[in-house]
Amino acid sequence: MSSKPKMFSPNRHVNAKKFVPRDRQLRQDLYKSKEWTSYRFRFLHHNPKCYACPNDSAVVDHWRAAKGDIELFEKNTNHIPLCKCCHDTVTALFDRNEVPDTVGKLKWLKESREKNALTFKVKVIPYRA
């Protein structure tokens, strides 16, 4: 008699809080706006490399997760270029919590830069052209 194959079931933290976005529509509108699209293109043009690894950048991430805060979202000193892999990693580990772990995120980024011997700085460009 054949038995069912064992299914993969990741261990979840019992106390982990689910990510519940505030003002989801507002945030989606921010990321789809012409201003953000234009800024993202210019920012990635001036910052072609990922901040944490030697790959090409593909995503504009926020040092501190904006979570619907428009002022923090648009603050040009709050942006860093990341490749998709690094962005997905920091988002899953640090930004998806109800209260984002900014200190943990900065520590992870610093360790990644040291491991990959990266020394370049992020070029800050104005949000509105």
Image (cartoon, helix red, strand yellow):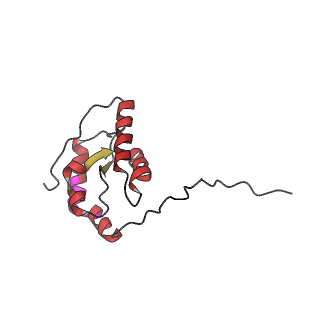
Q: Magenta stretch?
A: 32-39
Quarter location, residue 30: bottom left
Which residue: 86% across, 57% down? Answer: 1
Residue 21 makes an appearance in the image: yes
Q: Where is residue 117 drawn, in percent x and y?
A: 34, 28
Residue 54 makes an appearance in the image: no
Kindly give the residue lying farthest to the front in the view shown.
Answer: 15
Quarter location, residue 34: bottom left
Image quarter where the C terminus lies is bottom left
Position above or below: 70 against 125: below
Q: Main secondary structure of the magenta part?
A: helix
Kindly give the residue lying farthest to the right in the view shown.
Answer: 1
Q: Where is residue 93 drawn, in percent x and y?
A: 44, 50
Which residue: 21% across, 42% down? Answer: 46
On screen, residue 65 versus residue 18, left or right, reads left
Which residue: 28% across, 40% down? Answer: 48
Which residue: 73% across, 54% down? Answer: 5
Kindly give the residue lying farthest to the left in the view shown.
Answer: 129
Q: Is residue 99 magenta?
A: no
On screen, residue 36 versus residue 98, left or right, reads left
